[in-house]
Image (cartoon, rainbow, N blue to C red):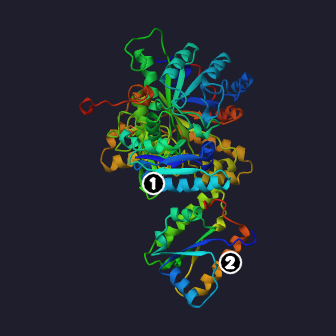
Amino acid sequence: MIKAEQKPFEEILEYLAPYNKILLSGCGACVTVCHAGGEKEGALLASALRMARQKTGKPLEILESTPARQCEPEFAQELSDTIGRVQAVLSVSCGVGVQTLARHFPATQIFPGVNTLFMGETVEHGVWEERCQACGDCILEKTAGICPIARCAKQLLNGPCGGSANGKCEIKRETDCAWQLIYDRSKSLGQLHRLTEIIPAKQWGVQSRDSGPRRIVREDLKV
Amino acid sequence: MSTFEPKIVAFCCEQSGLPAAEMAKTLKLKIPDNLELVPVPCSGRIETLYLLKALESGADGVVVFACYEENCRYLQGNVRLKGRVGYAKQIMAKIGLEQERLEIFHVATNSGVKFSEFLMQKADQLRLLGPNLGKIA
Amino acid sequence: MKSGSNLEKVFVNGHFAVTAELGPPKNNDVSVIQRKVDFLRGYVDAVNITDNQTAIVRMSSIATSAFVIQMGMEPVMQMVTRDRNRIAMQSDLFGATALGIKNIVCLTGDHHTFGNQVNAKNVHDLDSVQLINLVKTMRDEKTLMGGEEKFEGDIKLFIGGAANPFADPFEFRALRTAKKAAAGVDFIQTQCIYDMERFKEWMKMIRDLGVHEKVHIMAGITPLKSAGMARYMAKNVAGITIPDAIIDRMAKAAKGSEEGIKICVEQIQEVREIEGVHGVHIMAIEWEQMISKITEMAGLLPRPKVE
Ligand code: SF4
Ligand code: SF4
């Protein structure tokens, strides 16, 4: 799922400064799971913002709402009444949700309340790690199910760099070296021979974001 | 301002804080005038949001009376509480609220005296700090 | 001959090759290059020109290599995949060969966060194995990457790569070098060797894979200046191991720098005896003036004149 982190409080206060009534919109999906922008985190942020503004003598009225998935038009639409009653929206959904609101409410300023960081996995309670970069042409079958594009700091496709030591990456010593993981798992799968095959250069320019924003069209689903 | 009597919200765990409060009452020990007791079945039930909401809706100080750390009836409740209080304090720092406005105090069922003494001290401390400027009264 | 470079000829004629390293200036001062070239000319067969090593901005390796040629020495141009995509690299390969550069070492490069441009967007369009393959394709097929159409002219390059026998996972290290061999590398320069036992073990794996018959292995050697430097490297540089015996020897020596040179000379003599090692790559970082002494003491002089 998408992982995000709340923006610095000061930054949020700064762009809300001109307003005295806003909607704080959370999202019931990814950002709820990573405790960045679900109902709970949204309520906490709203409470903190109210108090901070109260202290400066410029009270801020905040309405709160948390659609199930802010990135789906029908849920975003649910907000239209509330949005009609406020001057601006602070959205603590991921960057996708912010844009869904922006698309549906052309006359309303929508501010991002979180920094959207990555697509990742929960490795333990309160710890999330990046796992996929949406390269558009998955090669996990070649790398024992571990992604070197998302998890190797140099995106190496043909084995570990010279800095891999004791299982850790030289760039961040608390991070596992992706190629050590690939090696270990290939070994336990009895597939070390696969690692001797050269993985050719990726076609970034065709499949990845490098070819511009991507789009999926399923004719059978269109109405 | 000389008559400022801080409002204290005290969350009391039913396994320790609440009996201590009752004992203080029975013994007619001194407690601050402007005190609101909120009983909770376990301090682990207190969400970060409750702590913040208490401050937002009028408290000058928030206290949680919880069991000693190894004594939680639900094993991990007061450990969770610690994490949440820590998180609430981080948020308070961002708002610019003094850290003294939120505190955990560990008690046992028979800590009536400690209960009273702690609250009286807390009230003095809050009187010096002055009102919580973030509250929306 | 693939490139006709001096380095290639030295190997082809069966000599034990010697290369050194030259770091370009952190500005556009050509006299720095001149000074370093003057220390090295005549003592080595070719000199590696680093490409913004440790991700610190320096004069480009291509421009520095061109100056080195003007100064009468043969460069080995390093090219890292960190900063350039395949368009820029192929364009630079045309330019470099037109400037008379005949050797290249293809590397991934140190991560940009180690350097002085931590906010850069790193590229990593290709990795070093893929770059090796790209250069080979340009040289042998005369086509660009993924292209059908042949271009005019020759890309005469002797293609090098790097290997680090001291990084992990150890068992993968020789396999990775074999991959570079399969991708088309002609020679390999290793990370500096202090742990001789591990290097010998790695060389055995290289021989078992038959890589030494396809590729000239050059053992990397870095003279230690002091016990302090040895300790620092052992502790802070990922992928370098320095046995305690060497650190002790440095610490006990009356003059660390002299001991460092002595150790370095012994190491050169030792690697020379290993089957499959065809040369040494001496990386005397900001200590280029010692190359003449080291090569002399190690019996590597005079350097062969090859045609
Ligand atoms: S290979 Fe591409 S699609 Fe597959 S996990 Fe990695 S980045 Fe994601
Ligand atoms: S240490 Fe491993 S994960 Fe880190 S850059 Fe090198 S190969 Fe990639």
**Please, which residue is most extreme toward the top here?**
C152
Query: Looking at this view, is B55 or A163 the one in front?
Result: B55
Q: Residues within 10 Å of mark 1 (few under 14, many from 20)?
A: many
User: Mark 2 sits on what residue?
Assistant: B121
**Please, which residue is most extreme toward the bottom here?**
B27
Circle 1 SS class: helix
User: Mark 1 sits on what residue?
Assistant: A39
Name the chain letter of the residue that bears numbered label 1. Answer: A
Q: Residue C280 carries which label?
A: none
Left or right: C133 as drawn, with respect to C25: left
Q: Residue at x 70, y 36 (%)?
A: C287
Q: Indicate the quadrant containing the C terminus of chain B: top left, top right, bottom left or bottom right.
A: bottom right
Query: Looking at this view, is A134 or C238 the one in front?
Result: A134
User: In whole angstroms, how far apart are the C-alphas of marks 2 and 1?
Assistant: 36 Å
Left or right: B96 as drawn, with respect to A139: right
Looking at the picture, which amino acid does disc 2 mark?
A: Gln
Q: x%, y% of residue A114? A: 52, 46
Q: Is residue A31 visible?
A: yes
**Same chain for marks 2 and 1?**
no
Circle 2 SS class: helix
Q: In this view, does C30 lie above or below B4?
A: above
Looking at the picture, which amino acid does disc 1 mark?
A: Glu
Q: Is the CB of mark 2 within 8 Å of ligand 2?
A: no
Q: x%, y% of residue C108? A: 51, 33
Left or right: A217 as drawn, with respect to A133: left
Quarter-of-image position of residue B117: bottom right
Query: Looking at this view, is C232 or A120 the one in front?
Result: A120
Q: x%, y% of residue C111? A: 56, 38
Q: Residues within 10 Å of mark 2 (few under 14, many from 20)?
A: few
Q: Is residue A163 visible?
A: no
Q: Indicate the quadrant containing the N terminus of chain B: top left, top right, bottom left or bottom right.
A: bottom right
User: Ligand 1 is located in which of the four quadrants?
Assistant: top left
